[in-house]
Image: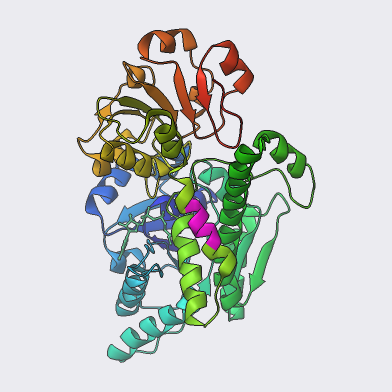
Amino acid sequence: MKITVVGTGYVGLVSGTCFAETGIDVTCVDIDKKKVDMLLNGEVPIYEPGLDALLARNLEKGRITFTTSLAKGIKDSDAVFIAVGTPPDEDGSADLKYVLGVAREIGRHMEDYKVIITKSTVPVGTSFKVKAAVQEELAKRKVDIPFDVASNPEFLKEGSAIDDFLKPDRIVVGVESERAEKTLKRLYKPFLMNGHPLLFMDIFSSEMTKYAANSMLATKISFMNDIANLCELVGANVDLVRKGIGSDARIGNKFIYPGTGYGGSCFPKDVQALVRTADEYGHSLDVLKAVESVNYRQKSKLVEKIKAHFGENLKGKQFGIWGLAFKPKTDDMREAPSLVIIEQLLAMGAQVRVYDPVAMEEAKHTLKDTVVYAKDEYDACIEVDAMLLVTEWSEFRMPNFRILDKLMNNKLIFDGRNVYDPEEMKDLEYTYYSIGRETVN
Ligand code: NAD
């Protein structure tokens, strides 16, 4: 079997490499020549644990290759996965120009039957727009080549993408023909060893499933952040509340950690896009609108605490930021709460030193020379008035506080991820602010 994956970002590259691992021939297509050249050399342009070794193995076996030419890439392939970006448009709806651009190009170059599968996260009905775009191009060429469309949303998480793809909780596929169903069944059979389901459904339901899943997860985060904020006001401890509710099997203990708000390339844009889709149908998704506004507010939570501590004018003050990526184990800076926090600190006149184990290079694209890039977490704390923990990388969990004491101007920490134990911070004589818990003075 031979497949093509168009787009070699987090989703396309991981999917392509994992499919190659099952023994099939994979060609990955990307318009970014620099990326394609790197990948042909076995260099992975993104940070994703385990991906470099998996890619190297499959390159060596000749099961995966990369090209900028879609015409070459789709030659002889049975299935084409579209895995390009779907960034938010100005009004928050998903911008489909990349997905439909790829569909048109497929229509311009395909020579034989293919299943064209949309893996990008796209609004309900997009697979039929893909179908129309391909048909239009075939009509221009005055050829009648059969093809099917399918929807196969991706649920992998950056940071554990390989494991998520190889051992998925479930695989969702929307189809409208038996031929497409058969192809996708064959392709995904090797990933079903752990007994988790391959769910076939209609295309509308499949497209909707992805948005509903991400929106539910974003809802859990905003709900917990709102509860955490109330905990602070009433004198409750959100950690205990979290454990108290998480042990109820109906609620579950995952994804109920309070923090500085969700970010990344998926939740913010997918929640927004679903709200816009609903608006188009005259339906107001009120729960999700509240999820968005709570999240917007939450990104300022640490800075609010800083203002309450130091006042509005931060001229002459310096802050050390631990963690820039929107979550640990990724270099993805898209919609990262750290960017909002840093922007606010700078606007109030503060100076900022930053450190992230892997996202520094990505962060430089946005932060440019507005901050000092430290060489490690201790360097980020030299002569700072406070440290802000923004991303809970595991290497930040057990710092040497004796070293920090000497480096920092004040023993003061604003912890946006509740990483440290308030009792321990009390013993260490730190002033310690966290989320949804009593402040230690
Ligand atoms: P990305 O921005 O990392 O990568 C997209 C890639 O597509 C880029 O390399 C770009 O150069 C390439 N591209 C754009 N136009 C192209 C074209 N015409 N031909 C060939 N290549 C082209 O995106 P991503 O994070 O991998 O996300 C892709 C899709 O998957 C999005 O719809 C996203 O919502 C969805 N998704 C992402 C994740 C995630 O964790 N990142 C998880 C699930 C689903």
On the image, the x and y values in percent for residue 301 come to 47, 41
Quarter of the image where one finds residue 73: bottom left
On the image, the x and y values in percent for residue 252 come to 73, 47
> Residue visible at 30% across and 74% down?
105
Q: Which image quadrant: the C terminus? A: top right
Q: Which of 170 and 435 is in front in this view?
A: 435
> Residue visible at 74% across and 50% down?
251
Is residue 252 positioned above or below 378 on the image?
Answer: below
Q: Is residue 422 left or right of residue 320?
A: right
User: Per the image, is 291 magenta?
Assistant: yes
Is residue 129 positioned above or below 241 on the image?
Answer: below
Q: Which colour scheme is used?
A: rainbow
The quadrant of the picture showing ligand 1 is bottom left
User: Per the image, is 89 magenta?
Assistant: no
Quarter of the image where one finds residue 155: bottom right
- Residue 210 seen in the figure: no
Looking at the rendering, the stretch of residues picked out in magenta corresponds to 290-295
Q: Is residue 192 left or right of residue 426?
A: right
- Residue 375 seen in the figure: yes
Kindly report the secondary structure that dominates the magenta region of the rendered protein. Answer: helix
Is residue 156 positioned above or below 423 on the image?
Answer: below
Q: Which of 113 and 384 is in front in this view?
A: 384
Name the residue furthest left: 369
Q: Is residue 433 left or right of residue 246?
A: left
> Residue visible at 45% across and 78% down?
113
On the image, the x and y values in percent for residue 61 come to 43, 44
On the image, the x and y values in percent for residue 106 come to 35, 74
